[in-house]
Amino acid sequence: MSTIDLVMPKMGESIMEATILKWHKKPGDFVKMDETVLEIATDKVDSEVPSTGEGVITEILFKENDVVAVGKVIARISADAQVGAAPASAPSPAPTPMPASAPAPVAAAPVASYQTANGGGNKFYSPLVLNIASSEGIAMSELENIQGTGNEGRVTKKDILQYVAAKKSGVVSTPAVSPAPTPEQTSAPAAAPAQVVVESPAPAIANSYAGSNVEIIEMDRMRKLIADHMVKSKATSPHVTSFTEADVTTIVNWRNKVKNAFEKKYGEKITFTPIFIEAIVNAIKKYPMINCSLDGNQIILKKDLNIGMAAALPSGNLIVPVIKNADTKNLYGLTKEVNALANNARNNKLKPDDTQGGTFTLTNVGTFGSLMGTPIINQPQVAILAVGAIKKRPMVLETPQGDVIAIRHMMYLSLSYDHRIVDGSLGASFLTEVANELERFDGSREI
């Protein structure tokens, strides 16, 4: 029998695992080449996994919500099996609790694995571990008491999943309540764990709002990931934000003049975003140290100029698709890619690679009416630029005939940067250069 292994695809250079969101097929179903078999999610984007062959699914090896490593076989397809045929073997069942008659030393082993660890609150936890802890109702105080087996005692996915399984089977309790077991306890009969009280933080959370006129809304997966990334970024980089303003009257007038002709010629609507990106690219060429990342004590200077742009998803969450090699594209090329990425984000059609490899990020807080903002750095980058709403304001202009007051289109810009490697001089100089690039825009430019 010819069997095709369907493996968890690699979703980007930094992605090592993904979560199975939904199976579209079941054992016995026929699938065509490139037909969607399941949906998966990483900490970057959701994606569909197509079939790599044609045939009948005979085996599904993981369940929905399972976290699977890249390259691991998740299903098998038989090119020879008949439609509706029984699967070769049933999907891997969830681990069953150990029966009461099992030997006592085996049941007690998980207790010894979760002795009180450093509870100082300064441990590092990966977003995956934090997500599992949140979904299982494990409080941070409880998480800090799990003994990790990873590098420098970090809690790994395996550690927390073992802890959750042990806790559900009643053989481990919240470390703050249950003291470390003695040698006599580890050799006690299997019935001993029944005396341990397992505490869950959920009732405490619910009780804190008892009698209040509130609605409790569970964070969706994307919002949890965004929250984790924001906290991690603030904990990693000492943020400094500098501000300036730019007179973008020439840009506004030029766009109003050419937008209809531009759309007729290229079939694309031109927005301000590609113009902003063009200015950022030109400024990075003069200040390349803003286009880097930090690895320990080593500064990684990026030669590629891959500009991320924050875009809104239908859920209201934000995602940052990336324009690769933005310095090689003219204004039309930037416009086409900006529009395509924004449209795919709105329709949940972004591919995993669309959000990978960014070296600098632009966010337009003006889209939502804000004059300015203090954005959080998109790790592992070292800077992020925010542009505010364009507003008409009276400004003093210097002319050969003297100073005059005129109505101008003005916009605030703010740059948040990692003060470990970007000092105020570099940050302010780069930001000023972006503003200068915008003000030097050629109003007679041909499309």
Image (spheres, rainbow, N blue to C red):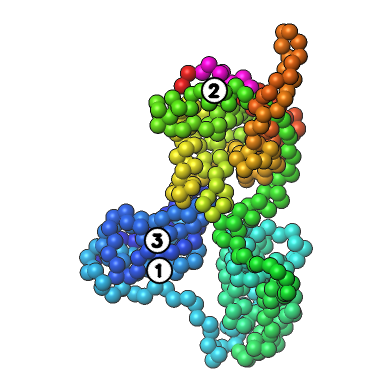
Q: In the displayed structure, does residue 123 sit left or right of residue 272?
A: right
The residue beneath circle 1 is 61
User: Is 335 or 236 nearer to us in this picture?
Assistant: 335
For disc 3, the marked residue is 38
Q: Could you tell me the amino acid type at mark 3?
A: Leu
Q: What stretch is highlighted in magenta?
A: 439-445
Q: What separation in Å lies between label 3 and label 1 (alpha carbons)?
A: 12 Å
- Residue 55, above or below 298: below
Q: How far apart are marks 2 and 1 (CA)?
A: 58 Å
**Mark 3 vs mark 2: in front:** 2
Q: Residue at 46% across / 67% down in the picture?
A: 64
- Say whether disc 3 or disc 1 marks the residue closer to the N-terminus: 3
Nearer to us: label 2 or label 1 = 2
Of callouts 2 and 1, the N-terminal one: 1
> Dot 2 lies on which element?
helix
Pinpoint residue 98: horizontal percent, then vertical percent. 53, 84
Mark 3 and mark 2 lie on one chain; the one further toward the N terminus is 3
Tag shown at residue 254: 2
